[in-house]
Image (tube, coloured by chain):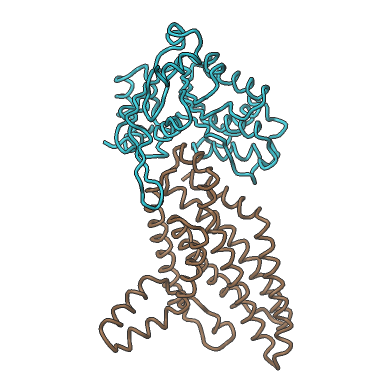
Amino acid sequence: MPASLRLFLSQPGDRFRTARDELDSVSNVLTATSLRKTVHVGFRRRPVEILKGVDLTVGRGEVFGLLGPNGAGKTTTVKVVLGLMRPTSGQVELGVGGLDRVGYLPENPYFYDYLSGREFLEFCGALFSLPSDVCRECVAELLRVVGLEDAADVHLRKYSKGMLQRIGIAQALVNDPDLVLLDEPMTGLDPIGRLEVKRLIQRLHDEGKTVLFNSHIMADVEELCTHIGIMAGGVVLWTGTVAEALAQAPTLEDFFMKTVRPA
Amino acid sequence: MRQTGAIALNTFKETIRDRVLAVIVLFALLMIVASLWLGSISLGEEGRVMKDFGLVAVTFFGLVVAAFIAAGLIHKEVEKRTVFVLFSKPVSRAAFIAGKFLGLAVTLAVVVAGMGLFLFVVVWVIDGAPTWMVLAAVALIYVQLLVVVAVTIFFSTLGSAILASVLGICVFIAGQLSTNVLELTRLGQNALTEALSWVVFVLIPNLTAVDVKPAVVGEQTADWGAIGLWCGYLVAYVVVVLALATAVFRRREF
């Protein structure tokens, strides 16, 4: 069965699938098996293999940092997980009951600039078919959490990059997801913005949610993550806990370099 | 359903808040006013010229809104990567296409109704009596424009936005010639031309069938039964085109 179909089948309408998932893997929120993705670029449709057999398992309640150099395939992996891209082969299984239970923050988010922050979040809530009164309440709460109460009725076109990143995180949480995927959540933020995003991730972890994020910033990863995966050249080279990584090298940075570029 | 409604509302907000729209409507109203002057230089034919010219203005500016805004609807979402937000949530491609179409359909309804009512009032003032046919003609122009929106959305799922606008307008023009194509099938000069003409007639929407401009200016009477049936046909045409657009868009990756 193609992975996109599996994703589709594991949406909440399909009770059987969800129940089986829970029996299968009580602890795994995300399982990707031998994901391959080839895209065709240029006029001559030259094939380029971005993912060359990605295996990845993320357990419930983990904060999972996906590390890797530019072009390693981190963003593509996340897109395949979400069904934004179809894998050429391989499978994705979500242990959370489909996209209903997933939140996603894209890299360098850009949203509808003619909407206010509040309108945008209410729109996102409606996409999850939340009843409008529940939605309104939850939007007000989220705006408070990400510190955008004062800018709630300002059009997104007037938001700074940091504010966009925060509204982006808010939209990823509007459905109270069990699995949150954040693509480069700290990139381009000032120190205050980074600290706030870090606190948010910590808070999600404390609430028992599973968070997977891509990052280049080792210090953040070391501080926040319980588990890490290191990707390069379209494959996952290593996965394990941060403690395991630190047992093999003095710093996470050293461990990363050792894994990505073995001597 | 909820998703389609939300996307439609969002599309409506997007398009109605677009400044370009205000400019287009302003131009349309100016054109209608200009028709007053055209009427005044046409000896004894003021009312007729006004109605004719006014309806053409409504059609033209409606077409500009339909073709140019529809082409950007999907293109912008893909280009600015807001599709990531949509399709990472449980939103189907069908709900997306339907929502985009319905949102612009509402905006277009506001725009066309505004222009139509303005024309209706102007004609009333000039003629001294209301010409209800003007309103019926405007409603039928709206139906034609919905076809253009659907066709343009379909072409925009294939790629280029500009090409989609151009092709949308082409289909509108071809639709105006539809009856001529049907004539061609009847000439029966050779089997190939006849077969080709039939294919063209089936592919392009028959927009002339719901054009009541001649009836508005009193050249002929409108056959409302036939017009009703042809409206049903155009709605079916829109549904088929949107289904095709969904099928194409399903294959897209982001």
Left or right of A261, for residue B118? right
- Image coordinates for residue A38, horizontal then vertical, percent: 34, 39
Q: Residue at x 44, y 17 (%)?
A: A228
- Chain letter of the brown region: B
* Whole-percent x, y for residue B160 in the image: 48, 57
Residue B15 figure quarter: bottom right
Query: Which residue is more in the foreground, A212 or A220?
Result: A220
Q: Determine the image quadrant of residue A261.
A: top left
Residue A40, above or below B143: above
Left or right, residue A162 beside residue B150: right
Q: Quadrant of the C terminus of chain A?
A: top left
Viewer-nearest residue: A119 or B252 = B252
Q: Nearer the viewer, residue A28 or B159?
A: B159
A39 vs B19, left or right, is: left
Task: Tell me: residue A159, above or below residue A184.
Answer: below
x and y, in percent, of residue A135 in the image: 57, 33
Specify the farthest residue to the front. Answer: A263
Give how far across and how far down residue A225 sits, in percent: 50, 16
Q: How many marks?
A: 0
Pick the residue in front: A47 or A27: A47
Which residue occupies 52% across, 25% down? A215
Pick out the residue farthest to the top.
Answer: A247
Task: Look at the image and give the colour of chain A.
Answer: cyan
Q: Quadrant of the N terminus of chain A?
A: top left
